[in-house]
Image: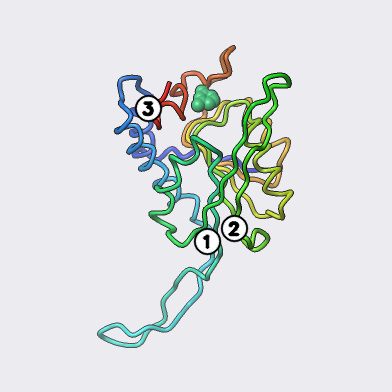
Amino acid sequence: MAKVYVFDHPLIQHKLTYIRETKTGTKEFRELVDEVATLMAFEITRDLPLEEIEIETPVCTTKSQVLSGKKLGIIPILRAGIGMVDGILKLIPAAKVGHIGLYRDPKTLKPVEYYVKLPSDVEEREFIVVDPMLATGGSAVEAINSLKNRGGKNIKFMCLIAAPEGVEALKEAHPDVDIYIAALDEKLNEKGYIVPGLGDAGDRLFGTK
Ligand code: URA
């Protein structure tokens, strides 16, 4: 069963408060999302495997630990997911970045894939799929379907704010995918926005309306 981690670190919660505020402008919003993504990446990489190597310090020869070459991939769901990529790359700069674009079919209201570009060695990588908002869960479920259909196996999902409805939908569709959240909010409203949320993450990141 999928595990759900809600990061209650004070720095994450502090920055999230300003991300939520309507009066926070595009520049500051973008910077804060970037910073929170870095802090979340620090937590999400806690279980990366290490190996021991021998090194020379100015004093002696010693054994010390380095990351044991795990191949990582970050997959932002277009377009708002892009806002979290650079923050993660600050900590894991060697990660490859794939993209998954989905639009909502106006008739069925279901997400439909329109763009997928992934690293060539999908089967060997561990992936973090990112989207700032986990609302109904439709996009996250479909993006992870796309990734799995192309061979992705080892997948985590990371978002800033989730609604309980989205968490349940994602857990049910992908019980093998652990979910990492900065805040679990109250509910979805009738327009599909997370309450209290932060509004439209894509519009706030890119200054569109
Ligand atoms: N997508 C957003 O950007 N915001 C929400 O509240 C829900 C989905």
Residue displayed at 56% across by 51% down: 98
Residue 195 placement, left or right of 114: left
Q: What colour scheme has been applied to the protein in the rendered image?
A: rainbow
Q: Which mark is residue 119?
A: 2
Mark pair 1, 2: CA separation: 20 Å
In the rendered structure, which amino acid carries the disc numbered 1? Leu
Q: Is residue 159 above or below residue 184?
A: below
Residue 195: image tag: none
| Residue kind at label 3, given as amino acid type | Gly
> Which quarter of the image is occupied by the N terminus?
top right
Residue at the disc numbered 1: 48
Label 1 Cα neighbours within 10 Å, binned few <14 / some 14-19 / many ≥20:
few
Residue 196 makes an appearance in the image: yes
Crowd around label 2: few <14 · some 14–19 · many ≥20 (10 Å): some
Q: Is residue 175 left or right of residue 54?
A: right
Among numbered discs 1 and 2, the one appearing first in the sequence? 1
Q: Residue at x 36, y 28 (%)?
A: 17
Q: Secondary structure at mark 3?
A: loop
Q: Look at discs 1 and 2 and give the one toward the viewer.
A: 2
Please, what secondary structure does the residue beneath circle 1 have? loop
| Residue at far front of view | 114
Numbered disc 2: secondary structure: loop
Q: x%, y% of residue 34?
A: 38, 42
Q: x, y percentage for residue 95?
A: 49, 59
**Hey, which quadrant is residue 208 in on the image?**
top left
The residue beneath circle 3 is 207
Badge 3, how many Cα within 10 Å: few under 14, some, many 20+?
Answer: few
Residue 83: % across, % down:
43, 39
Residue 207 picture quarter: top left
